[in-house]
């Protein structure tokens, strides 16, 4: 946990010690899983002038609630919204200082968030966890995207929707996720009805932080469409909600009320209070909120039809625009204007990617590899990657299912679990590391093939996120999906994407497409598929497909998750 925000500035061509160039700048703030980053960007060309990062003081509460020390049940993941305010107070001023610009040059600010990360608040925006009597109540906090404890509620939401023939279900690939707003709200109602009754608004953290900045309650079209079942101008009906749970009938009317705003629009003006937090001028434009993956698309200049962006980090989110509406089984959603106005935005995803590689390093790598990495002066990830890169395709004799954190697409089942087939006494940590990289690449290929089968072909594949730095991962993906990879040049894709939206909200550009062309940056064909390796991966992918289909229904994996306990007599 850091006590200060870490700062950095990108070389934008200025001589050392030279004053920063004149002209308007914007601030993008990316609220990630573990930290928040503020980025100062020049409006004219997207040059990144300075940034600052603050690790959330409470991090992610997965085992205990910080306020009381009480144990949390399995698959919970909470955050404290005060950490988000602290990012505004500390990271934004430090980013301005790192950029060497005057705060008076800032014309707008925009934010993005992990999603779905909804929270219960009072009518004035006060988080329920800050209200009297609720500090020690877990359900009063933000339920982070990786909170999967509402699977039972999600199952019932889906079952009732299928029974009633709800037309919106197909827009989400046939299943609503336990990660999203309705399942988490239903869990709140059923497990802490008193907290539910005290909740005036159920709001995404992406919209709450905008509320804090401009004093106006808004709901962005992206979060509402993908995470809150908003389709064709409406949410699910009262009759449907009553069928799910009679006490849930008023959820939409009572707790989701609020105007819906387009991405890139101006939500309002920076309030005096928020100006004091950030050091920015009162009255500058505050952009409508956004989701971290979707906001990154303009930064990578991937907002055209058929251009899929995979934002690869702890998990991967796949987003793409298309001119046509299609209903693809297993996708996370399709939303009119969900990424950019005038196009249908599609989303799919994988619940665990970088987390899988981290699991190998933390729990399946013997000490000698750690010692070797230290001696070489590299990370264990880099060491395992280098060793795995020496192998031919299939040399390790393994095939894995990448479901260690469940399956988001195409099965939409967070109670599935991982599988590794082919283990022998000769299997070593680099083998497992490579097999899991390959499994995540196979998962992405499954998604791409599903889009093609649904009539929305992926014509280009763009990559953003921390995993883009790993050459082994990138080359395996290029070989497996048989497509060139175009890499976002910025290391701060979501924050840059947010800054692009801030420029649009401030009126510097007519729309997100124009701002993307001027401020985004991408390296095309950074990795290209090798024909021989691609052919070898076709064989392994067939094995992956057989395992995928054999375990897709999940009976055995679900049974193991229930972990029956047999008491042993003393």
Image (spheres, rainbow, N blue to C red):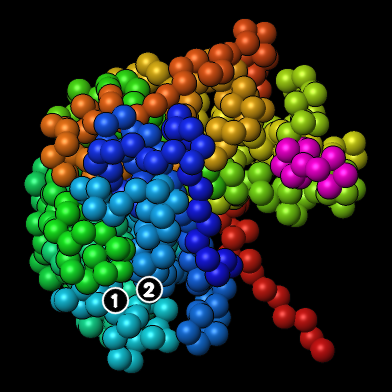
* Gap in angstroms between the C-alphas marked 2 and 1: 9 Å
535 or 19: nearer the viewer: 19
Name the spot of residue 408 as percent of width and height, x first: 45, 45
* Label 2 secondary element: helix
**What residue is shown at x 42% (from left), y 86% (from top)?**
136
Crowdedness of circle 2 by 10 Å Cα count: few (<14), some, many (20+)? some
Magenta residues, start to end: 374-384
Along the viewing direction, whichever of 400 and 12 lies nearer the viewer: 12
Identify whether 471 is placed above or below 264. Answer: above
Tell me: 112 left or right of 559.
Answer: left
Depth order, front residue of 363/510: 510
**Are the two marked residues, 2 and 1, in contact with CB atoms closer than 8 angstroms?**
yes
The secondary element bearing badge 1 is classed as: loop
Give percent across and percent down for residue 553. Answer: 50, 44
Tell me the quarter of the image containing the N terminus.
Answer: bottom right
Q: Which residue is mark 1?
A: 127
Q: Is residue 123 above or below residue 457?
A: below
Kindly report the secondary structure that dominates the magenta region of the rendered protein. Answer: helix
Residue at numbered disc 2: 82
Is 451 inside the magenta-drawn segment? no
Residue 87, above or below 513: below
Q: Is residue 446 left or right of residue 545?
A: left
């Amino acid at each position: 946990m850091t006590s200060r925000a870490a700062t950095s500035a990108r070389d934008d061509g200025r001589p050392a010690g030279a004053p920063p160039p004149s002209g308007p700048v914007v601030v993008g703030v990316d609220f990630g899983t573990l930290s928040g980053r503020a980025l100062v960007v020049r409006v004219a060309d997207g040059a990144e002038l300075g940034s600052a990062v603050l690790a959330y003081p409470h991090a992610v509460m997965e085992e205990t609630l910080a306020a009381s020390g009480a144990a949390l049940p399995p698959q919970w993941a909470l955050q404290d919204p005060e950490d988000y305010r602290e990012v505004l107070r500390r990271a934004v001023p430090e980013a301005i200082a790192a950029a060497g610009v005057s705060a008076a040059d800032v014309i707008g600010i925009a934010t993005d968030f992990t999603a779905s990360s909804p929270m219960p608040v009072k009518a004035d925006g006060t988080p329920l966890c800050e209200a009297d009597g609720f500090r020690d109540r877990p359900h009063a906090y933000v339920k982070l995207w990786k909170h999967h404890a509402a699977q039972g509620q999600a199952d019932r939401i889906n079952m009732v929707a299928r029974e009633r023939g709800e037309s919106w279900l197909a827009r989400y690939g046939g299943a609503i996720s336990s990660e999203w707003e309705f399942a988490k709200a239903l869990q709140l109602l059923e497990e802490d009805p008193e907290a539910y009754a005290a909740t005036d608004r159920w709001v995404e953290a992406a919209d709450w932080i905008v509320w804090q900045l401009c004093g106006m309650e808004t709901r962005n079209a992206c979060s509402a469409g993908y995470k809150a079942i908003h389709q064709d101008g409406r949410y699910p009906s009262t009759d449907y909600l009553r069928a799910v749970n009679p006490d849930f009938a008023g959820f939409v009317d009572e707790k989701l009320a609020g105007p819906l705003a387009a991405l890139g629009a101006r939500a309002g003006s920076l309030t005096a209070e928020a100006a004091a937090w950030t050091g920015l001028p009162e009255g500058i434009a505050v952009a409508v909120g956004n989701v971290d993956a979707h906001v990154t698309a303009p930064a990578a200049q991937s907002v055209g039809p058929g251009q899929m962006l995979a934002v690869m980090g702890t998990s991967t989110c796949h987003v793409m625009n298309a001119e046509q509406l299609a209903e693809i089984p297993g996708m996370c959603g399709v939303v009119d204007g969900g990424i950019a106005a005038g196009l249908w935005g599609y989303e799919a995803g994988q619940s665990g990617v970088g987390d899988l590689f981290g699991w190998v390093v933390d729990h399946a790598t013997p000490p000698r590899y750690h010692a070797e990495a230290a001696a070489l002066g590299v990370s264990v990830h880099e060491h395992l990657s280098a060793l795995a890169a020496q192998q031919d395709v299939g040399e390790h004799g393994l095939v894995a299912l990448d479901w260690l954190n469940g399956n988001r697409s195409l099965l939409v089942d967070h109670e599935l679990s991982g599988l590794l087939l082919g283990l022998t006494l000769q299997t070593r940590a680099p083998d497992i590391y490579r097999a899991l990289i390959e499994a995540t690449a196979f998962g992405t290929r499954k998604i791409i093939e599903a889009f093609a089968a649904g009539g929305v072909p992926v014509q280009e594949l763009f990559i953003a996120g921390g995993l883009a730095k790993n050459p082994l991962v990138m080359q395996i993906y290029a070989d497996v999906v048989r497509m060139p990879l175009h890499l976002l040049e910025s290391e701060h894709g979501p924050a840059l994407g947010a800054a692009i939206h801030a420029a649009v909200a401030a009126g510097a550009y007519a729309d997100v497409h124009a701002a993307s062309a001027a401020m985004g940056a991408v390296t095309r064909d950074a990795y290209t598929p090798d024909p021989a390796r691609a052919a070898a991966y076709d064989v392994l992918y067939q094995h992956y497909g057989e395992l995928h289909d054999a375990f897709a229904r999940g009976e055995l994996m679900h049974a193991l998750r229930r972990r029956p306990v047999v008491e042993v007599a003393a």
